[in-house]
Image (tube, rainbow, N blue to C red):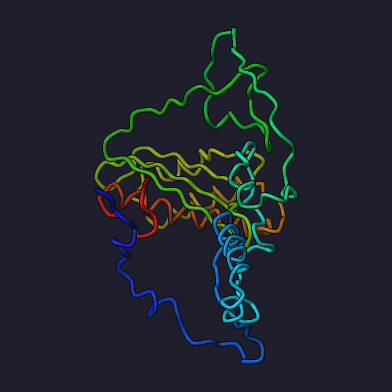
């Protein structure tokens, strides 16, 4: 028995909630025959294949207007960061563009090797695994074979929030993770981690200490937020300034802690569901 996604539409009125009348002046509008939202692999492939089919139907092409097919992309260029990955099977692209080999690649993979480590194994705390941007504590010949997670105590949960610039790349401006264990309404254990505000992920012990023993009152949250901001060592870049990212770290700490507490109490937040 087969099922199609169209049989289970989301409970929203797409036309009523997402579509509206044009707001731009009439002389600035571009009339298009088919608009494809998203310039990723699927969107670009759809546009290319549709235009290939329209070449064989000039009458329909003419009916679709001056711009028969348009791709709408939020990035600076269509497919700006979508065609990526260390290794890919080129058969789909070659089928789509049989006479064009200009798509970007570094050449064919001519072989592969498997290396076995003969020097035993060792364990590294996760907070010490990354030692710098793009650098880990792995030694020559070592590979990661497993992650060991401690058993979660009762009345425990966590939350992770991050702020991202939804313009071109899905890269965090700031990321904050909070893990809590509670007895009643009092925090008995906590861990706080920060991402994107230093060369490596930070485990902020002072923020955790501010939460432990508290009932997540304003004073405790303020102290933990201040500890997070004090631990930040960000840079100025296109994602945000040092001042902005330092401030947001404290803001996200408070929100993450409250979500973690609510999850312990069986309350879920829309848009922040655990995986």
Residue 16 relative to residue 118: left or right = left
Count all numbered tags in the image, as a single digit.
0
Task: Name the image quarter holding residue 135.
Answer: top right
- Residue 53, image x, y percentages: 58, 64
Residue 108 relative to residue 177: left or right = right
Task: Name the image quarter holding residue 166.
Answer: bottom right
Is 76 above or below relative to 150?
below
Q: Nearer the viewer, residue 182 or 154?
A: 154
Report the residue at 66% width, 58% height from top.
239
Q: Nearer the viewer, residue 210 or 57?
A: 57
Is 178 above or below relative to 113?
below
Report the residue at 70% width, 26% height from top.
110
Q: Nearer the viewer, residue 117 or 31?
A: 31
Residue 186 relative to residue 162: left or right = left
Residue 161 relative to residue 151: left or right = right
Task: Name the image quarter holding residue 56.
Answer: bottom right
- Residue 168, image x, y percentages: 63, 59
Report the residue at 45% width, 55% height from top.
254
Pick the quarter of the image with the C terminus.
Answer: top left
- Residue 26, image x, y percentages: 62, 92
- Residue 211, image x, y percentages: 41, 45
Report the residue at 43% width, 52% height from top.
256
Q: Residue furthest bottom?
A: 26
């Amino acid at each position: 028995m087969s099922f199609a996604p169209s049989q289970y539409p989301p409970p929203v009125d797409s036309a009523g909630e997402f579509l509206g009348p044009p707001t731009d002046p009439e002389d600035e509008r571009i009339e298009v025959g088919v608009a494809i939202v998203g310039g990723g692999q699927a969107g670009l492939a759809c546009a290319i294949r549709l235009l290939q089919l329209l070449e064989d139907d000039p009458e329909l092409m003419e009916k679709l207007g001056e711009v028969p097919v348009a791709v709408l992309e939020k990035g600076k260029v269509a497919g700006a960061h979508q065609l990526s990955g260390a290794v890919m099977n080129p058969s789909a692209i070659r089928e789509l563009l049989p006479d064009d080999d200009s798509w970007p690649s570094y050449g064919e993979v001519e072989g592969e090797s498997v290396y076995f480590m003969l020097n035993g194994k060792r364990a590294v705390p996760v907070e010490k695994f990354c030692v710098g941007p793009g650098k880990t504590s792995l030694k020559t010949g070592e590979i990661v074979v497993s992650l060991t997670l401690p058993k979660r105590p009762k009345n425990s949960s966590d939350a992770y929030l991050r702020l991202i610039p939804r313009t071109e790349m899905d890269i965090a401006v700031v990321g904050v993770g909070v893990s809590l264990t509670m007895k009643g309404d009092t925090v008995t254990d906590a861990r706080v981690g920060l991402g994107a505000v230093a060369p490596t992920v930070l485990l902020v012990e002072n923020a955790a200490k501010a939460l432990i023993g508290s009932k997540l009152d304003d004073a405790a949250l303020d102290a933990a937020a201040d500890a997070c901001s004090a631990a930040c060592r960000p840079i100025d870049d296109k994602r945000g300034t040092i001042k902005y990212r330092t401030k947001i770290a404290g803001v996200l700490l408070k929100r993450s802690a409250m979500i973690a507490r609510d999850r312990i109490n069986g309350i879920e937040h829309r848009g922040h569901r655990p995986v």
